[in-house]
Amino acid sequence: MSFASGETPSRAADSPFSSAFGSNATPLPLRSISADGAVAVATGIGELDRVLGGGLVAGSVTVLGGEPGVGKSTLVLQALASLAAQGRSSLLIAAEESGEQVRRRAERLGAAVDGCYLLATTDLDVVLSAAGQLEPSVLVVDSIQAVSDSACGSQAGSPSQVRECAGRLVRYAKSLGVATLLVGHVTKDGGLAGPRTLEHLVDTVLSFDGDRHQSLRLLSASKHRYGPTGELGLFEMTEMGLSGLVDPSALLLGDRRRGVAGSIAVPVLEGRRPLVIEVQGLVGPTTSGVPRRVAQGVVGGRLALLLAVLERRCHLALAASDVFVSTVGGLRVSEPAADLGIALALVSAVTGIAIGEEVVACGEVGLAGELRRVQAIERRLAEAARLGFRRAVVPQSAPEGPIELELLRAGTLLEAVRLLLGVVPAARSGLRTETGGGPELSGGRDVRTLVRTPPSLVS
Ligand code: TYD
Ligand code: MG
């Protein structure tokens, strides 16, 4: 790789990326200051642009954080190739991989294109001098933990090195108006000097998540100076790199099995985007002294709360049961709107009664067992209807839904259980069938003898 001066593209040629950060010591009336420089330039990777609120802004600094192996290098390479196809030059600093490795990946992705320059180095002075010569539209440093400033003294990747290097890169980006992307590794617990220590220094913090063993990848912004933070980008990791998922339901619901107890579809909101996902519950007698509560994709505290409500308000005896809850596809759900779905999946698992595959459930569960309305329920229900769901269990106060959806309104979790599963509580003992006479139910019991009532609402 060379930086022969004849190859240096001129800044004027990349005019949409001209600086929004010209320094001026004289205060000016706010209204007289142009806001044109903050125009976002689309990368052409639709799901990335969605999260960025349009694209990259000249002079902005973005951290792309994620666990090792999630696909950060792949995403930036695809974005740079797409920008190059629009005639925008870029400089990729490979601080963790050799030039050959990056070239091989680029070929696999069809991203080995003109306009995309590569420099394999870990020396920040070399990075800044190369960037100064090349004047790219976009600079990517992969990763910020692997570069170091020799003047700083401490080891590469240490908090002070990461801060110092990022600080110098931010000053470079602002003074030359170069959109700069810093890749940063984070561990599951957010440890390691990385994106978290940089948050206040940069304009945008993106987080790239996903289970390495599954193909779904989620991109979201936790901080964004140039747009909203609520958007979610969805990708599938394929043999040919990351592919944007405009309609992710096939991946999220594709492997759903019919007639299995413990499963329910839940419309969740990721940013402003409604998605219908499958929530599964499994309950069985505990195999150790301390019952296990395992929540995958669901906040552990929320599961504990729902178990307490099920126990106290629905008389479901789970104290001696192992309880597992999981969202399918690797999606993490933290909003209370999924409460009702999680609780119903658990009751379905305990009773062995399958919930109809055409049913979705959506509502927050209060400590008194009451169901509460959730935000943007109309959008959630519209998405469920679009995907072909036909019935929705919702809080009593929910507004009218789409005409294709039959709404099953319930004031409490208990009512929802009765409506959907046809079982009613027997005080302090467990759930019984509506016809009565059924055995007591608890997570530790064999429930196959349960005689189900045939209410019209049970599938
Ligand atoms: P990578 O972008 O190197 O991750 P990160 O930079 O976040 O550490 O991607 C790593 C994983 O992605 C690796 O396990 C291989 C997989 N992968 C694919 O499945 N398809 C592809 O086309 C590419 C380039 C990578
Ligand atoms: Mg990488």
Image: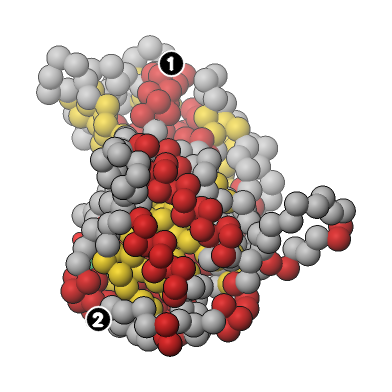
Q: Position of residue 138 (x, y in %)?
A: 48, 69
Question: Label 2, label 1: how many angstroms apart (C-alpha)?
Answer: 59 Å
- Left or right? Give the position of 66 relative to 108: right
Which of the four quarters of the rendered structure image does ligand 1 lie in?
bottom left
- Left or right? Give the position of 342 relative to 187: right
The residue depicted at 32 percent of the width and 35 percent of the height is 191
The residue depicted at 18 percent of the width and 24 percent of the height is 285
Identify whether 400 is placed above or below 304: below
Mark found first going from the N terminus, 2 or 1: 2
The residue depicted at 27 percent of the width and 62 percent of the height is 121
Q: Which residue is mark 1?
A: 312
The answer to which quarter of the image holds residue 445 is top left
Instruction: Count neighbours of disc 1 (C-alpha within 10 A) and say few if under 14, some if 14 to 19, many if 20 or more.
Output: some
Looking at the picture, which amino acid does disc 1 mark? Arg
Q: Secondary structure at mark 1?
A: helix
Looking at the picture, which amino acid does disc 2 mark? Glu
Instruction: Identify which residue, 51 or 203, lies in the foreground.
Output: 203
Q: Which residue is mark 2?
A: 107
